Amino acid sequence: MYSWLGGLLEKMINCLKMKQFAAFVTKEFRHILRDRRTLLILLGMPVAQILLFGFALTNELKNTRLAILDPAPTLVSSRIAERFEASPYFTVAARPTSPQQIDEAFKSGLIGLAVVFQDADIQLIADGTNPNQAMMLTSYATGIIEAEKNAEIIRNSQNISAIYQNGPVVRMLYNPQGRSAYNFVPGVMGLILMLICAMMTAIAIVREKETGTMEVLLVSPMRPIYIILAKTVPYFVLSIANLATILLLSVFVLQVPVSGNILILSAVSGIFVLTALSLGLLISTLVSTQMAAMLASGMGLMMPTMLLSGLIYPIESMPMLLQWLSTAVPARWYIEAVRKVMIMGVDVRFVVREMTILGIMTIGLVALALRNFKERL
Amino acid sequence: MILKYLIEKEFRQIARNAFVPRILVAMPLAMMLVFPWAADQEVRDVRVAVVDGDHSTTSQRLVGRIAASPYFELATVAQNYPQALQSVESGDSDIILQIAHGFERSMVEQKFSQIRPEKSHISITANAVNGTKSMLGTAWLTALLANANGENSADVEKNMASQGVVSGLVSTKYRFNPRLDYKVFMVPALMVMLLTMLCGFLPALSIVAEKESGTIEQINVSPVRRRDFVLSKLVPYWSIGFVVLGFCMTATWLVYGLVPAGNVLSIMLFSGIYLLVVSGMGLVVSNHSDTLQQAMFVMFFFIMILLLMSGLFTPVSSMPGWAQAIAAINPLKYFIEVMRAIYLKGSGLRELLPQLGALIAFAAAFNAWAIGSYRKNS
C-alpha cells in the first residue's frame, strides 16, 4: 500500500519536474526567437556556406589565362595554339612578342601559364605561387601538346598501330566528375554543427552568468544540472534543423547524393552534435564573460576545426605532430565518417571506429564539465 | 586634444581585459608557426593498392618502382579487386592499380611484332572524393607506367624523329616558387587572415561592449564628437595591426626563410590601408548591433564568406562568373593578391595600382559608414 502510494507520489513529482523542465526549455527557445538577427544568421549560415562551397569554391581548373610566345610560327605551333584556344581549361589572353612582356604579365597577375615556342622545343612556364594549380596546369598543357603530337604522327604514318600505345584504363570511384562539392559537403556539416552547438551553448550559459540572471535560476527549485540541460535542448533542435537543411540542399541543389544509409548518417551526426554540445558546456564552465566565451570558442574552436579537421586541407599532408594534434579535433572524426557514409556509401562497420571515438570524447567532455560546474557562483 | 585621452582609454581597456592581450599573442603565434604546416594542400604519398594478376617479372618490377617512388606509398598488395576496394573503403589506400594477366606477354609482343594489343592490361581506379588528389595521383601513375616501358617509348621517339614529324620536347619551368612549396604560397595569405580576424573582430566587439555595459551613455552626453569617438576606436587596432604584421614578417623570415621579393614599404602602405578597411567594417557591424552576441555572429557570417571568397583556399579564377563578381567587391581578395604578388613575385606599386585604388575606396566607404551609423541619441 505504502509503496504504491510512494510510487504515485514519485510519479507526480516527476511529472511536475518534467513540466518545470519544459518551462525552462520554452524560456530558452524564447531567448533565441527574440533575437531575430542572430537566428537569421544561424539558419542562413549553412545555406550560404553550402551554396558557396558547392558552386563557387573549387580547385578545378577553368579558363586559366595563357600567353603564347611564338616568334616563328610553324604549322605545328599554330595547331597547338588552336588546341589551347579550344580547351575549356585555357583562354589565350595574350600573345606577347618578347620574354619581358611575359614577365610583366606574370607580375601583374594577368596570366597563369605561358607557352614559349623556341626553335623546335616548347617551354611551359607556370606561375608556381600556387603549387597544385601549377602542377595541374602543366599536366593539362602537356596533355594538349601530346595530343597534337599524336595526331601529327597519325597523320603522317601509315602504320598507326606500330607506334600507338595503349594507356591504362582509368576509373574514378564515388565522384566520377571530380567535383569539389563531394569533398566539401561533409566538411561544411562538421563546421556548422560545431559552430552552432558549441559556441551558442557556451555563450547562452555565460550570458546568464554575466547579466546576473543565473543567480535567479539557481535559486529556483530545479536542480542546476537540469537548468544547464534545458539550455542545450534548443540548440540541439536547431542543429537538427541545420543538418536537415544541409542534406536537402546538397541532395537537391548540389546533386551530391547520400549514397550510404541515412540512418547511419543520422546516428553519426547525433553523436557529433552531443560532442559539440558538451564542448560548449565545458567552455561555459571555464570562462566568465561573453567576450571570453566568444573568443575562446571562436578562435580556439573554429580555427582548429577549419584547418585541422581535413575540411580543406588533407590530414595526410600534415607533419606527424599536427596529425596527432588533429586526432583531438572532434570534427576530424565526424567529417571522416560522413565522407565514408555519405559519399562512399560504405557499410556501418567501416565507421565504428569514428563513432566510438566521438562517443568517448563526449563522455570525457561531459565528465570534465560536470566536475567544473559550480552550483554557487 | 580629447582624441588623445580617448585613445589612451582604449589602450587601457585593451590592456586590462583578461582575454584580449592573450589572444593578441596566441593567435599570431599559432597562425604563423602551426597553421602553415596544416594549410598544406600539397599532395604527396598517394597510397596505392596493387592487384597483380600477372605475377611476372615486369609487373613485379612495376610494383617495385611504385614502392620506391617518392610520390607513392605502397599501401597493400591485394589478392583481388574486392580486397583492394575494401582497403579504399576503410580509408587505407587512395588508388587501386590492377595489372591483368598477360600484361608482360603483351609488352613483349608489342616490342617485337609491333602489334597493338587488343585491350589494355592495366586499369587504375581512384577514390575521387578528393578531386585534386585523385587527379594528380592518376596523372603520376600514368607517367610512371609510361616510363616503365621506357625502351618502348624511346623507340617511338626515334621513329617519330626519323619521320621528321614532331619537333622537340616539352620542358617545364615554375616561376616564383621553383620548389613548389605550398607554405610559401600560404604564409602571405595567412598574414591577411590573421589581420582580418584580429583587427576586424576586436573593433566589432568594442562599441557594442560599451552599449551592453552602459558606458556609451557617458560618451553620448559628453562633448566628444562622433568622428573623434570612432577614430579613438580605430587607432588602437590600427597600431596593434602593425605590431602583429611586424611580428609575422619577422617570424616568416626566421622560420621559413621567406622575405618579400618586392618592396617592404609597399607592404606597409597596403597594410595601413587594409587595416582601416577591416577595422571600419568591424565598427560598422558594432554600431548596428545591440548585443555582443549579435555583433559576433554577424561578423562571423561576413568574415567567413569573405575568407572563402577571397582566393585564400581556392583560386578565384576557378569560380563561376557570378562568384567572381561577388569576389570583386571583397577587400580580402585584393589584399591577398597584393601580399602574394609582393612577397613571391616582387611586383611593384605600378603593377598593383588597381588593387590600391580598390582598397582606398573600401577604406573610405567603410569608415564614412562607421562615423555615419554611430548615433549619439538613442
Image (cartoon, coloured by chain):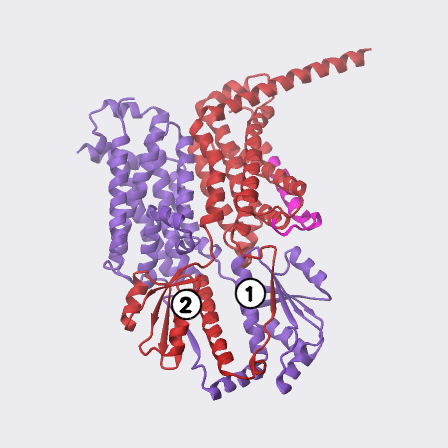
Chain colours: A red, B purple
- Of residue B371 and residue B240, the one placed in the foreground of this image is B371
What is the residue that sits farthest to the bottom in this orientation? B162
Q: Is residue A222 left or right of residue A136?
A: right
| First to last magenta residue range | A343-367
- Of residue A318 and residue B90, the one placed in the foreground of this image is B90
Residue at horizontal 35 percent and vertical 58 percent from the top: B340
Q: Is residue B80 left or right of residue A131?
A: right
SS class of the residue under badge 1?
Answer: helix
SS class of the residue under badge 2?
Answer: helix
Instruction: Where is residue A329? Give x, y as percent.
Output: 55, 46
Residue at horizontal 42 percent and vertical 43 percent from the top: B304
Q: Amino acid at mark 1?
A: Gly
Subunit ID for the residue under disc 2: A
Instruction: Where is residue A264? Give x, y as percent.
Output: 67, 43
Residue at horizontal 21 percent and vertical 36 percent from the top: B4
Report if residue B173 is visible in the image: no
- Of residue A8 and residue A88, the one placed in the foreground of this image is A88
Q: Amino acid at mark 2?
A: Phe
Quarter placement of the C terminus of chain B? top left
**SS majority, magenta:** helix
Report if residue B320 is visible in the image: yes
Quarter placement of the N terminus of chain B? top left
Instruction: Where is residue A89? Give x, y as percent.
Output: 44, 62
Callout 1–callout 2 Cβ contact below 8 Å: no
Residue A374 quadrant: top right
Give the number of the mark in front: 1 or 2. 2
- For label 2, the residue is A84
Residue A69 quadrant: bottom left
- For label 1, the residue is B137
